[in-house]
Every structure is written in structure tokens, then in C-alpha cells.
Amino acid sequence: MTSAQTFPAPAPPKFASIGSSYFSIVLALMAVVLILSNIGASKGVAIGPIITDGGFFLFPLAYILGDVISEVYGFKVARKAILASFALSVFASLCYWIIIALPGFDDDFGASKQAALEGALGPVPQIVLASLLAFLAGQTINSWILVKMKSRTGEKSLWARIMSSSVAGEFVDTLIFCSIAASVIGISDFGSFANYVLVGFLYKTLVEFLFVPVTTAVIGWIKRREPSYGA
């Protein structure tokens, strides 16, 4: 009579502490990318039949940086990074509101400057709200899936973790963001809205897929230099 075959339990996933300078650098980059993409998103962009916004080339970078934080530092740290980034985005939006509200010069130049500021930065608070809710939901799902998969695969199949989590996270993010932000950038009919959602989701996901080799290389570079990784 043979005994049942047993398999060794998977090793617990490795993560680094946030004591080194690498985490603060990645967090600062994430916050800057989010603030700039929120400003850019207030402008509608039409490239042939494609409808998007001015932050389209920036926002995928925030998710790539989120993947780096999730993989190296874990879900709890990633959640703190998300909240910190958006607290800074809300602060930036408050500053825009104060700048617009301050009394300006009464000449023609001052009036044109005020109109330009209101046009460029006035819609940002609603964009920040859209981005806040979308990124909180999408990035949390993205980070949770990535870390959950890491607990099963360990250090193997990083590319699969990044790609799988990106599809889920980007879909939720894009749907929520577009639903709130569409009216701000001038999208009012369903066809344009569907175009906006579909293009945004496919574009962001494609960018993350194309950058998987770069993301993987950056993650490996940080892991090798984080003294507490896996300690």
C-alpha cells in the first residue's frame, strides 16, 4: 500500500520594507504622474476616429509604477501609496481652486489669463474625483490580484501577474473614470462615450503589455538593491 504523494507548501511571497529611498522615489513619481494626467484629462483629444483625453499618454505610467510597488512592497504598502498619491491630487486641485478665486488684474491681459486658467484648471476637481474613484477601485483590484497571484507562484511568472492584474484593473478604472469625466471634456452622446471607454481601456492595457519587459526589469533592479527584500 503506497502513501499519498505530498507536495511542499509554496513559500510565502517575498516583500521589502519601505525603509530605503527606492519606495519614496517611486511614490513621488506616481503622485506627479497622477497630478499631471488629471490636468491633461480636462482636454478632449480627437485623433482621427479615436476619442480620448490629454492625459492618455501619462496615466498608464501610474499603473506601471503601481505594479512595481505591489510586487516589491506588497498590497498594504501599495494601498498606502494609492491613498497618498490621491491626497496630493486633492491638494493640487484645492490649490487650483484658490489660484482661480484670487483677484487678478483688470486689464485685458489679466482677463485673458483668468479665462485661460478657468478653462484649463477649472474642470480639474471633477477630473480628480473621477480619477480618485477610478484609480482607487482599479489600482486596488490590480494590486490585490498581483499580490494574490504572487502568493501562489512566488518569484515565478512575474509577466503573467502584471498582465492578468492589468486587464482587470484597467477595465474597472476606465469605466469609472470615463463615466464621471466624459461630460467635463465635452462627450455627450453614447457613441462617443463608448469610443472613449473602449479606446481608453485598450490603449492603457496595450501600453502596460508593451512595457512588461521594462516593468519586469525595473522590478528586478529594485529587488536586487532592496536590502530587506525577502529578509
Image (spheres, rainbow, N blue to C red):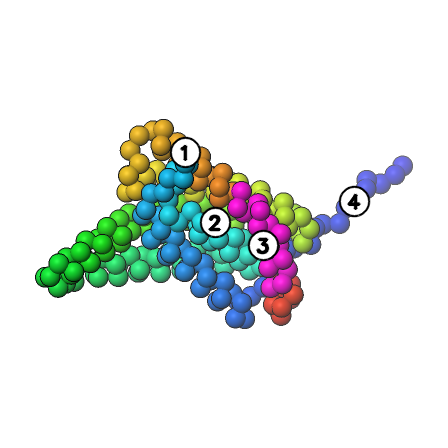
Lateral position of residue 216 relative to residue 172, left or right: right
Between disc 2 and disc 3, whose residue precedes? Answer: 2
Q: Which mark is residue 49?
A: 1
Element type at marker 3?
Answer: helix
* Pointer 2 residue: 60
Whether residue 54 appears in magenta in the rendering, the answer is no
Instruction: Look at the image and give the residue range highlighted in magenta.
Output: 206-222
Report whether residue 175 is seen.
Answer: no
Q: Is mark 2 on a helix, strand or loop?
A: helix
Badge 1 or badge 3: first in the primary sequence: 1
Marks 2 and 1, the one that precedes in the sequence: 1
Q: In which quarter of the image is residue 86?
A: bottom left
SS assignment at label 1: loop
Camera-side residue of 227 and 219 = 219
State the separation of the CA atoms marked 4 and 1. Answer: 57 Å
The 10 Å Cα crowd at callout 2, few under 14, some 14 to 19, many 20 or more, is many
Q: Distance between the residues labelled 1 and 3?
A: 30 Å
Quadrant position of the N terminus in the picture: top right
- Residue at image x 39%, y 31%? 194
| Residue identified by numbered label 4 | 6
> Which three-letter amino acid code belongs to the residue tagged 4?
Thr
> What is the residue that sits farthest to the left in this orientation?
106
Q: Would residue 210 be counted in the magenta stretch?
A: yes
- Circle 3 residue: 215
Q: Residue at x 52, y 53 (%)?
A: 64
Prevailing secondary structure of the magenta residues: helix
Taking depth in this image into account, of 47 and 147 the one nearest to the observer is: 47
Q: Which amino acid does label 1 sit on?
A: Pro
Q: Residue type at mark 2?
A: Pro
